Image (spheres, rainbow, N blue to C red):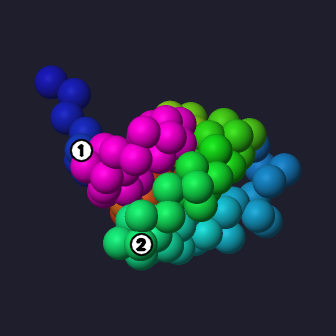
């Protein structure tokens, strides 16, 4: 039986050429979670859409496809002013960021 010792850990392989900028990229996504939560309180869906759009584009560029997927959900939900979906996506992103471990290759 093959048991993963830390099942909550998400391992992402990232090109070592971007090693110097990945920690800041991930830290900025954590800041985005807080910012989007504040923007939700103000119904600032245009700004939320913009943040989601940037996440969608940047995540995959660094090897974080899940960040791109969540960014797309945020962007689409902002277009329809869907607070519930945006809030859920922010929680997913926050959870992902807490669990992700980067392995440089």
Residue 5 seen: yes
At a point 50% along the width and 40% down the height, the residue shown is 79
At a point 22% along the width and 28% down the height, the residue shown is 2
Characterize the magenta stretch by its predominant secondary structure: helix
Residue 89 seen: no
Give the foreground label among 1 and 2. 2
Q: Residues within 10 Å of mark 2 (few under 14, many from 20)?
A: few
Where is mark 2, residue-wise? 42
Tell me, for residue 67, which label it has, or none.
none
Looking at the rendering, in which quadrant would you find the N terminus?
A: top left
- Sequence-earlier tag: 1 or 2: 1
Where is mark 1, residue-wise? 7
Q: Picture coordinates of residue 57 (x, y %)?
A: 70, 40
Q: Residues within 10 Å of mark 1 (few under 14, many from 20)?
A: few
Q: Is residue 30 left or right of residue 25?
A: left
Q: Is residue 100 left or right of residue 95?
A: right
Give the magenta range: 71-93
At a point 64% along the width and 53% down the height, the residue shown is 50
Q: Dot 2 lies on which element?
A: loop
At a point 37% along the width and 56% down the height, the residue shown is 90
Query: Looking at this view, is 18 or 79 the one in front?
Result: 79
Q: Is residue 46 above or below residue 15?
A: below
Q: Dot 1 lies on which element?
A: loop
Q: Picture coordinates of residue 37 (x, y %)?
A: 39, 69
Q: Is residue 15 above or below residue 90?
A: above
Q: Is residue 55 left or right of residue 76?
A: right
Query: Looking at this view, is 100 or 34 the one in front?
Result: 34
Q: Picture coordinates of residue 34 (x, y %)?
A: 44, 74
Q: Picture coordinates of residue 66 (x, y %)?
A: 49, 38
């Amino acid at each position: 039986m093959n048991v993963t010792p830390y099942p909550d850990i998400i391992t992402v392989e990232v090109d070592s050429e971007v090693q110097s900028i990945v920690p800041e990229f991930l830290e900025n996504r954590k800041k985005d979670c807080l910012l989007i939560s504040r923007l939700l309180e103000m119904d600032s869906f245009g700004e939320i859409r913009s943040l989601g759009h940037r996440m969608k584009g940047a995540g995959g560029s660094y090897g974080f496809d899940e960040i791109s997927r969540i960014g797309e959900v945020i962007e689409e939900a902002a277009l329809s002013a869907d607070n519930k979906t945006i809030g859920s996506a922010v929680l997913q992103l926050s959870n992902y960021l807490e669990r992700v471990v980067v392995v440089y290759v």
